[in-house]
Amino acid sequence: MSSTCLSSVLTRANLTMYQTGLPDVLPSQPNVLPSINTMQLSNPAYSSGLTGATSVSTVHSRQMYRQLNPHCWAAHHVLEWISDHVESTKFDATTLNLDLCVMDGPTLCQINRDQMIEVFGPQLGPHLHQSLQDHKTKYELQTLSGPELDETCQLLDHFWSNLNFPLLSTIVIGQGDEVSKRELDYQDDYDLTSLTMDAMTPMGDPGYLSDNQSEYSSSSNSGMFSFANVSSPESGSSESEPEFSYPVISKMNVKTENGESRLKRPRGRPPKVSRDHNSSFYDNPKKNKHAPRGTHLWEFIRDILIHPEKNQGLMKWEDRREGIFKFLKSEAVAQMWGQKKKNSSMTYEKLSRAMRYYYKREILERVDGRRLVYKFGKNSSGWKTEEIGMAM
DNA sequence: GTCATGTTTCCTGTTT
DNA sequence: GAAACAGGAAACATGA
C-alpha cells in the first residue's frame, strides 16, 4: 500500500532527524492519553501493524506530538502528525512531496486552509487542517480550563480509551463484524463514534430483561461490547452493585384488551430488594461513606460541551452564544453519564427525564420543535465564553 | 431520624 | 412505526 510506503519514508525521516533526539519516555500527562502507554506496550498487534522500521519505542515517540501544543511541535512532530493522518486516511502518499512536509509547528500553524490544500492536496489538506485546528483548540482549552473540569475530562478520556481498546482484544460491531484493535487505533482522531456507538448502545432496555438476566452477567454478553464489562477507575472492580435487577415482586399481572395476561410493572422506580447474599453489601461501611457529591447532570453536559476536542461528536453547540446545544450521540452521552454514576443501565430516555426537570428550575430552557436540542437557562453557569475566558 | 434535593425508573400519552 | 418529548408518580442516594 502506498500510504504504508510513505509512512516508512516519514518514519525513517523521523529516525534520521532525531536519532540523537527524544528519549522514549512516557508522556508527562498520563491522564490525558492513558491508553497509548498501556496499549502500545502491551499489544504486539499494534507494533506489528506498523511499518517494519517502526519499533515499539518509536510508536511512543510517534505519539509525542499529541502531548504538545502544535505551536511547540518540532519538524519531526509535524512529520509524525502527517504520517498518522496518511495512514489513517489511507491517503495515496505517492502524490505527496516530502520536502513540503518538513516544517516546524509554528510554521505549520500559520498555514491556512487553502494553503494546506495547496500543499497536501484536496483530499488530505482539509483533513490535516481540521486536525490542526482540533489540536490547537485542545491546548487552548487545556490552558484556560479550571481544575473543576478535570473529572469530566478524565471520564471522556477513559470513555474513549475503553472504546478504542476494550480489553486489549477485538470488539464486535453488530453481528459478526470484527474490527481489529489496530484499525480502531487509527480511528482515534476521527469519527470513531460513528463506528462504535451502535455497538455500545444499550443491549435492550435492561428493565425488560427477564428477572434472571442482569446486565452484570458479563458472560452472557458473549463478546458484545458492554460498559458493564469495562473496568473503570470510578466503577471499581470489586463492588459490583446488584441493584439493577428487577425482582418479580415489582411486577403485576394485567389484562390486555384481548384478555391476555401480561406482566406489567407498577409505576415508579422499583424498590430495592435486600437479598440475603447482599446484606453485607448494605452493611458495608465503605459503601455508606459520604462520597463527594459529583457534578450535576447539567454540569456534566456542560463540561462535555466545552471540551470539543474530547467529546468526539457526542454533542455540539448549535448556538454557542445562546447556550443552545444538541445531542449527536444521545445514547453514548447517557452511557457516559451512567458510567460516572456507576449505573450501567442509564439510557437517554432516563437522562432526558432528568434534563426536563431542569426546565422548572430554569437551568435549562425548552427549544420547541427541535429534537435532542436543549438550551442552558439563566440558572446555569460556566458555559459562556466570557465565563471560561476563551475567545470563540 | 427527618427532610430537601437531585436524580432514577417506569409509565402513558403526544409529537415529530 | 419509531424515536423523542412531556410530565406524573414513586423510589432511591446523599447531604444537612
Image: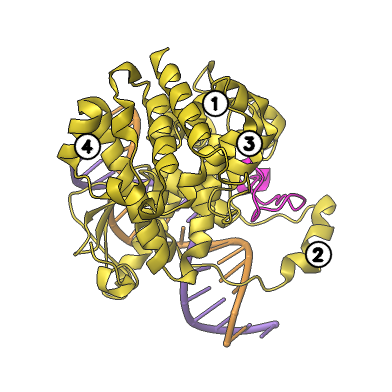
Chain colours: A yellow, B purple, C orange
Describe the element under mark 4 as helix, strand or loop. Answer: helix
Label located before the other in sequence (3 or 1): 3
Q: Residue at x 44, y 32 (%)?
A: A187
Residue ID for mark 1:
A182
Mark 2 or 3 closer to N-term? 3
Within 10 angstroms of label 3, few (less than 14), some, or many (20 or more) residues? some
Total marks in image: 4
Identify the residue position indicated by label 3 in the image. A57
> Which of the numbered marks, if any, corresponds to residue A284?
2
Q: Which numbered disc, 4 or 2, marks the residue that appears first in the sequence?
A: 4
Query: Which numbered disc, 4 or 1, marks the residue closer to the eye?
Result: 4
To which residue does mark 4 refer? A116
Residue A309 position, x and y percent, is 38, 50
Distance from label 4 to label 1 (Cα)? 28 Å
**Mark 4 or mark 1: whose residue is earlier in sequence:** 4
Secondary structure under badge 2? loop
Alpha-carbon distance for marks 4 and 2? 60 Å
Is label 1 in a helix, a strand or a loop?
A: helix
Q: Residue A261 lies in what quarter of the image? A: top right
Q: Earlier in the sequence, mark 2 or mark 1?
A: 1
Q: Which residues are magenta?
A: A228-251
Between circles 3 and 1, the one closer to the viewer is: 3
Residue at 49 percent across and 22 percent down: it is A174
Residues at circles 4 and 2 in contact by the CB criterion of under 8 Å: no
Which residue occupies the foreground of this view, A234 or A92?
A92
